[in-house]
Image (cartoon, rainbow, N blue to C red):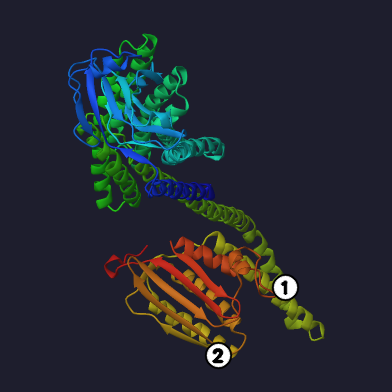
Amino acid sequence: MKSLIKGFIVFFVIVIVVLFGFIFKSSSPEDSDIIHINHWQIAWTDHLEPQPNTEWLEGLDNWTDVRAGDDIPVMPSTGMSQWIKIQLPELKGNSEVLLIEKIYGKHIVVNINGVSIYETQRKFNYNLNSILVPIRAEESKQTVYIGVSANNKIGIFDEIKIGDYQSLMKDFIRQSISDLILGSTLIFIAVIMLFCSVFLKYVNMSMWFSLCAVIFSSGLLVLTYSPFVFWLFDYTSTGRLLVILFDVALFILLPSFTFFFEKIFGPGYFNLIRWSRKFLVGYSTLCILVLITNEIASNRFYNVYSLITTQFAGYIIIFQFLILICLLSIYMIKGNKEAVIFFVGVLSFTLFCAGELIWYYYNDGYYKLFLWKVGVICFLTSLIIILGRRFAENHEQVVEYSKQLEMFNNELQRSEKMEIISELAASVAHEVRNPLQVTRGFLQLLVEKQQSSDKVYLSMALEELDRASGIITDFLTFAKPEGGKVTTLNVLDEFIHIEGILIPLANLQGGKITVHIPKNLYVRGNSSKFKQAFINIIKNSIEALKGEGDIQIWGYEETTDVVLHIKDNGEGMDEEVLARLGEPYFSNKTKGTGLGLMVTFRIIEVMNGQIHFNSKKGTGTEVIIRFPSVKLEENVTG
C-alpha cells in the first residue's frame, strides 16, 4: 500500500509536468499568419432575429465600439440580445477560419452579408461557448455579424483569431486538452483507489473513500467546466448531462473534503469541523433536491436554483476555507506535521481558487476560472501525502504491536512454565528430600566403616546425593523465593559479603573482581536471597572467563531505581542462547541444570526488579539489574 501511495504521488507529479508543459506551449509565440482582432462594435435588440438581412442589421441604433479587455458592456434591460459587428481583413485562402474561444450566450448566430453560416442554440444553462467558423477568400473585407442571446452573461470579451484551419485548431486544442488530461486522470485515479479499497482494513475505509470522493469530484469538475468538452459534445442531451454532473461534483466535493479533514484532525475546537461537515451535508442535500426539482419542472426554477447552488456555494467555499486555514494555523503552532502538509495544500488551493472566485464575483461572472486547476493538483497531492503518512504510521503500529505480542507471548509461555515448575517443586521436593537424607545418612555410615576399594564408589554416591539435594534446594527456592525476613538492604554491605565469598573462586580461575558501589544505595529484600541471586550471576561470569579475565561490578541510582551492572570479558553468548536464559534445564555447562539462573530470575522478580543481558559471542557479557530504590528514612523491617 505504501508503494501505491508513492505511485499516486509520482503520477500527480507527471500530471503537473504535462499540464504545465501544455500551458508553456500555449504561451509560446504563435504563428505569424494568425490575425488577432481585438476590437468590434455591438448593438442591442429586444430579441434575436436568426436570419436578418444586412439592411436591418446596419439600421440598428447605437452601434458602440468595444475593445477586448475593456469594461464589460452592461445589458440595457433584462432579456435583450446583442449583435456584434466585425470587419474581416484580407484573406489569403479558402482554408481560413474565424475562432472565438470564449463567447457567452445560449443562442448564437453568425451572419456574413445577410447569409447565416453558423447557428447554435443550447437548451441547458451553460453560456460559455467556443465557436469555429470557416470563411473564404472572397469574403475578404466583408462584415461579420454575430447575434447572441442569453439570460445574463452575454457577448465576446477576448480577442478573436483568424487564420489557417490547421494552425488554429492545433492552438485551440493545445490550450484546451490540459482540461481533458487532468480531469480524466483524476477520475481514473479515484476509480483505481476505489478498486484498491478491497485491500484495506476497516479502520482506514472512511478516510480512503472520502479521499476517493474528493479526487473523483475534482476530476469531474475540471472535466465538465471546460468549454472544450461542450464544444466536442455540443448537443442538448449531452450538454445538459455535463452541466448536471458539474453541479453534482461540487455538491460531493464540499462535504467529502470536510469529512476527510475531520478524520485527520478530529472534530476541532468546539466541534467546529464536525458542525461544518454536517452543515455541508445538509446544504449539498438541499442542492441536489433543488436540482431534481428544477430538472423535473423543465428549468422553470432556474433562478432559485442558480441563487442556491452558484451564489451561495461560492461564499460557502470561501468561508469554509477561511475556517480550515485558521484551524490549521492553530494545529501548526502546536507542532502537528500533518497540519503543515495540509496547510500548504489548502493555502495553495485557497490562493488559486478563493482568489479566482473573488475575482470572478468582482467581474460579475465574466471570467473563466483556470488557475484553480493548479490549486486542485497541489491540494490533492497534500491529501495523498497525508494519507500515505497515516498508512505508514499504521504499518509501524502493526509492526510494534506484533513485536509486543511476541514478547507478551514469550512472557506468557515462560510464566506458564514457571508456574508448572513451581507447583511441581512445592509438591514433590519435600517428599523426595526426606528419603534422600535418610539414604545419605546410611551411606555415610557405610563409608566410615568400609576399608575396601568400594569406599571410592560410596563417596561418589554421596557426592551425587549432595548434588541431588542441591537441585531440590533450588526447586524449593524457586517455589517460595519470598520466604525469609524482608528488610532494607545496603547494597554495598551485601556485595562486601558476596565479594568475600567469590574472590577466592575467581583467583583460582585466574580472574579478577572489581567492585565500585556507593554507600547510599538501598533496596528492599531478603539478604540471603539477594546474595544467592548475585552469587549465581557472578559465578556464571567467573566460569565464562575460561582463565584470566576481569569482572567489573558497579552501581548507581537512576531516578527511582538502583541500577547494578556486572560485566565480564569472557566467552559471551549468541542471540539464540540469550533468548533462552532463565528456562529450566537450559544451560551452557556440561553438568548444568539451568535451575540456578531460573532461581535468580525468580528472586529478582519477587523483589520487583528487572534483569537484562547484553552479550556477543567472544566479547563478554553484561548483566543489568534494576531494583526500586528505597530511601534511608523508609527503612522499616518487613
For the C terminus, the image quarter is: bottom left
Question: Which of 193/232 is in front?
Answer: 232
Left or right: 342 in relation to 442: left
Count of residue discs:
2
Q: Quadrant of residue 607?
A: bottom left
Residue 63 image position (x, y, % from top left):
20, 23
Left or right: 129 in relation to 403: left
Please name the residue shown 18% across and 16% down the image: 77
**In the rendered view, would you say 137 is above or below 6?**
above
**In the rendered view, would you say 187 is above or below 14?**
above
Secondary structure category for the residue under label 2: helix
Inter-mark Cα distance, 1 to 2:
37 Å
Q: Residue furthest front?
A: 138
Question: Amino acid type of disc 1?
Answer: Phe
Circle 2 residue: 507
Dot 1 or dot 2, earlier in sequence: 1
Mark nearest the camera among 1 and 2 is: 2
Question: Amino acid type of disc 2?
Answer: Asn
Residue 250 image position (x, y, % from top left):
36, 29
Can residue 451 be seen in the rendering of this structure?
yes
Circle 1 residue: 442
Question: Which of 348/59 is in front?
Answer: 59
For the residues labelled 1 and 2, say whether their Cβ atoms are less than 8 Å apart. Answer: no
Can residue 266 be seen in the rendering of this structure?
no
Q: Residue furthest right?
A: 453
Query: How dense is the environment of label 1, judged by Cα within 10 Å: few (below 14), some, or many (20 and up)?
Result: few
Please name the residue shown 45% across and 70% down the image: 625
Query: How dense is the environment of label 2, judged by Cα within 10 Å: few (below 14), some, or many (20 and up)?
Result: some
Secondary structure category for the residue under label 1: helix
Left or right: 386 in relation to 193: left
Residue 88 image position (x, y, % from top left):
33, 32
Question: Which of 608/465 is in front?
Answer: 608
